[in-house]
Amino acid sequence: MREGLSNTVRNRLLASLPIEEYERLAFYLEPVPLEIKQELYQPNEPIEFVYFPLEGVCSLLSLTAAGDLIEVGTVGYEGMVGLPVFLGAKQIPGVAMVQVLGNALRMRAEAMRTHVTPDTVLYNVLHRYTQALFNLISQSVVCNGMHSIEQRCCRWLLLTQDRVGDNQFALTHEFLSQMLGVRRAGVSEVAAKLQNAGFISYRYGKITILDREGLEATSCECYSLIKAEFERLIGGNTMM
């Protein structure tokens, strides 16, 4: 990672670029806030922008036939929202929604298609990031089918903390139950158990991670596998 950009650009993908390339792309990058529950793209609608989060976390959601939204992946400052644009698609039957508020740099989809070409570093970085995100989604499918709500909740909290970069973030039981695809009562029971164990504190819609090692020990192996793949493909500091 280039020292100059790593000190000034929060997003890890952009920070990995040569300064000259980043400066060329910066003309097309617009700073925008990310508000909780803001939808960055909607099902089967044209994707107008891609987003490089600087702070905050976005959920990638799939829509069921009953109209329910289930999380399949998350994106924080290590990544980009809008990969379908990079992969040549104009829309997707899913939703990208902000789950933890923050800020991002956004680029128009047309600018992405025009200026992120095979001769750029970002093009190659995004290929590796696409593989890392694919691995995350695949492992999440395994996790949802094989592991307990408690293990899945710990995995989710750890991944979210990695992306937030802080031990405290806003989160309701209702939103967490939607992200995990389970009943709210089940999430409330698990959250109470983790709080009684001293792993987390939950108050006024905010979760504070108190004992990260405890969460890691309670989580399934999926968290460490996902983290290792991001480190291998994107860089050792991506998930820190």
Image (spheres, rainbow, N blue to C red):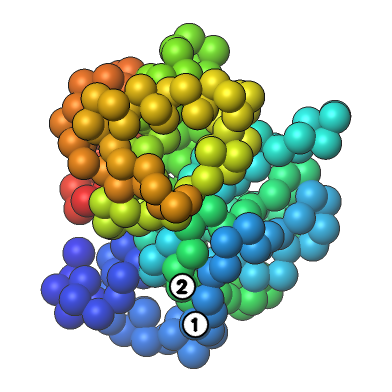
Q: Which residue is mark 2?
A: 103
Figure check: 79 above or below 183: below
Quick one: 132 or 38, which is closer to the camera?
A: 38
Mark 2, Cα crowd under 10 Å, few <14 / some 14-19 / many 20+, is some
Residue at (44%, 12%) from the top-left corner? 147
- Residue 125 lies left or right of residue 38; in this view the side is left
- Residue 81 lies left or right of residue 147; in this view the side is right
Quote the CA–CA distance across marks 2 and 1. Answer: 7 Å
Figure check: 39 above or below 146: below
**Looking at numbered disc 1 in the image, what kind of residue is underneath it?**
Pro
Answer yes or no: is residue 141 visible: no
| Quadrant where the image shows the N terminus | bottom left
Residue at (43%, 23%) from the top-left corner? 190
Q: Which residue is mark 1?
A: 31
Q: Earlier in the sequence, mark 2 or mark 1?
A: 1
Residue at (70%, 49%) from the top-left corner? 95
What secondary structure is marked by label 2? strand
Query: What is the x, y in percent for residue 233?
Result: 31, 43
Residue at (24%, 32%) from the top-left corner? 199
Query: What is the x, y in percent for residue 136?
Result: 44, 34
What secondary structure is marked by label 1? strand
Asked if disc 2 and disc 1 are in contact, CB closer than 8 Å, the reply is yes
Answer yes or no: is residue 211 visible: yes
- Residue 118 lies left or right of residue 96; in this view the side is left
